[in-house]
Amino acid sequence: MNTSALRLPPSLHVLERGWLSSNNVLLFGRDEVAMIDSGYVAHAEQTQTLVRHVLHQRGRERLDVLLNTHLHSDHCGGNAALHAAYGCRIAIPAAEDDKVRRWDEDALSYRATGQRCPRFAHDQLVRSGDVVRLGDLDWTALAAPGHDPHALLLYCAQEGVLISADALWRNGFGIIFPELDGESGFEEARATLELIRSLDVRTVIPGHGAPFSEVGDALEKAFSRLDYLQADPLRNAHNGIKVLVKFLLLERGRIALADLPAMMREIPLLRITNARFLQMEDAALADWCVVQLQKAGAAASDGVFLLDR
């Protein structure tokens, strides 16, 4: 995309993706090329094609470093493919070190959400407060719990640019996952938004959606959204179930209506969220989800399949 209107540094190139894959940020330094987040595995071939094209445009051949803001499948599902293609070093949030070494798909959320992520190895750990040199600029890693307990922001004070991942979008933020599973998340998300408000940010590169400069308005909307969800955690549960099913629908294109009740039971986070908040029969929850996704314009039904739209 053309980022000049947002006054992004010339060393940055943002690949704006859809909702199945996170955005990718390429950072071109004199000696190394780095990338932030790698998208979902279903788009791995597309991601490689896009990266190869941008590298060629810049007269470069290698991707040297791949850094993940957090390890949800839509942000690191392309890690293995990019490492195989370029041999790039992979850096992850330090708190995820042991889970990745053991490849614990339960702790890493992939089994819990019914999503896929090919195994990868990492070479470097990034902690909150670390300063990493990417694209010949200094970026400070900052803890950003809420959506994910171990997520990191990347902030370049020199340029006023924030890579916010799913902590802040133009119109909201990612699901507060810990709350679905009985852990604290709302207050952590609020603290992360307060942290962002304390920074001199002129441009935000979110995990999904276009980069934006209306930082104050985005924060106001995010705080309002958080207040709404926290006032009744059932709202976060409803949103979480719809988003999890929509993600699977984005990947598959269609899901047989007859299979939805079993999905509600067999995908751990759907089952746990239902048990904690809704306490509906599997078939009733499936019917509710179909109605809600259709009402939101996110799906259609032909009587046999739930169809992505």
Image (spheres, rainbow, N blue to C red):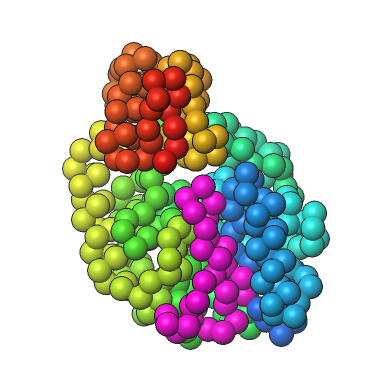
Q: Which residue is at the front of the view, 203 or 289? A: 289
Where is residue 231, by image quadrant?
Answer: top left
Residue 19 is one of the magenta-drawn residues = yes
Q: Is residue 203 above or below residue 287?
A: below
Q: Where the C terminus falls, by quadrant?
A: top left
Residue 250 sits inside the magenta stretch: no
In the rendered image, residue 232, in percent from the top left (x then y), is placed at 20, 38
* Rendered view: 289 above or below 218: above
Residue at point 48%, 22% (across, down): 256
**Residue found 57% across the figure and 74% down from its top:** 13
The picture places residue 220, in percent across and down from the top left corner, at 23, 64
Question: Which region of the structure is painted magenta?
Answer: 1-27
Q: Whole-percent x and y of residue 94? A: 60, 55
Q: Is residue 90 visible?
A: no
**Which one is in front, 14 or 163?**
14
Q: Is residue 51 visible?
A: yes
